[in-house]
Image (tube, helix red, strand yellow):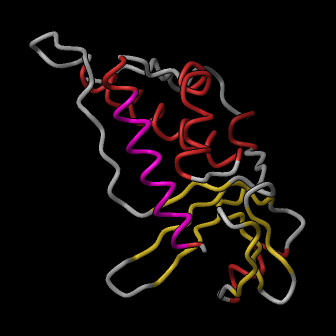
């Protein structure tokens, strides 16, 4: 079910991308109002999956808009975005959760699926540590060998004393692209 869910997720991203481009509508919230239900029905996606699809598509077009703004011909309409990689964005704990004994529970189009995962000792230490917080993840499926990968993001708040010892402004990021 995980591979089929990933296939449907990518197909839904391509559908949403084509819709966004042909209707010149790139806002996640507006796309959600317009095609959320169709994504759920046509591709069999769960609620959060459909929302993630629209977020992924909107983010990709936002990047296209930023790149196109700096072109000399003043053509600011984004190129059509096509998703090829077999990847799916997951939110913790709604879409996935890490269980004891190195088992993971994943939301799929057929309901929850539970399966094993492998970690190195260092990664296990981080996941088990109360200092680190589990965040979103990405499932990727490599078709050439049939392997499925779960890329889990974790975060830890770090207080850097260097920031408090500065005598003035070190720099300001204006978000400008050269």
* Residue at x 65% of width, y 56% of height: 90
Q: Where, quadrant-wise, is the N terminus in this rendering?
A: bottom right
**Horizontal and vertical percent position of residue 124:** 75, 82
Give the total number of marks visible in the rendering: 0
Q: Is residue 16 magenta?
A: yes
Give the left or right position of residue 137, taking residue 125 as reference.
left
Residue nearest the viewer, comparing 155 with 67:
67
Give the left or right position of residue 13, taking residue 78 as reference.
right
**With respect to residue 96, does 38 lie above or below?**
above
**Horizontal and vertical percent position of residue 125:** 78, 80
User: For residue 71, what is the image quadrant?
Assistant: top left
**Horizontal and vertical percent position of residue 126:** 76, 73
**With respect to residue 149, does 41 lie above or below?**
above
> Which residues, given as a range, are shown in magenta?
3-19
**Horizontal and vertical percent position of residue 53:** 54, 43
* Residue at x 44% of width, y 36% of height: 16
* Furthest residue toward front: 41
Q: Where, quadrant-wise, is the C terminus in this rendering?
A: top left
* Furthest residue toward left: 73
* Residue at x 27% of width, y 24% of height: 78
């Amino acid at each position: 079910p995980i591979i089929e869910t990933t296939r449907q997720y990518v197909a839904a991203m391509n559908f949403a991308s084509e819709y966004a481009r042909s209707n010149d509508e790139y806002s996640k919230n507006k796309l959600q109002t317009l095609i959320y239900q169709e994504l759920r029905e046509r591709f069999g996606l769960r609620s959060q999956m459909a929302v993630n699809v629209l977020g992924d598509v909107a983010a990709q077009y936002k990047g296209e808009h930023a790149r196109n703004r700096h072109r000399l011909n003043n053509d600011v309409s984004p190129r059509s975005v096509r998703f090829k990689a077999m990847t799916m964005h997951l939110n913790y704990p709604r879409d996935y959760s890490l269980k004891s004994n190195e088992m993971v529970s994943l939301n799929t189009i057929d309901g929850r699926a539970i399966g094993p995962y492998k970690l190195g000792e260092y990664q296990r230490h981080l996941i088990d540590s109360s200092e680190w917080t589990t965040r979103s993840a990405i499932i990727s499926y490599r078709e050439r060998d049939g392997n499925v990968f779960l890329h889990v993001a974790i975060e830890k708040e770090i207080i850097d004393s260097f920031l408090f010892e500065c005598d003035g402004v070190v720099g300001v990021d204006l978000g400008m692209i050269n």
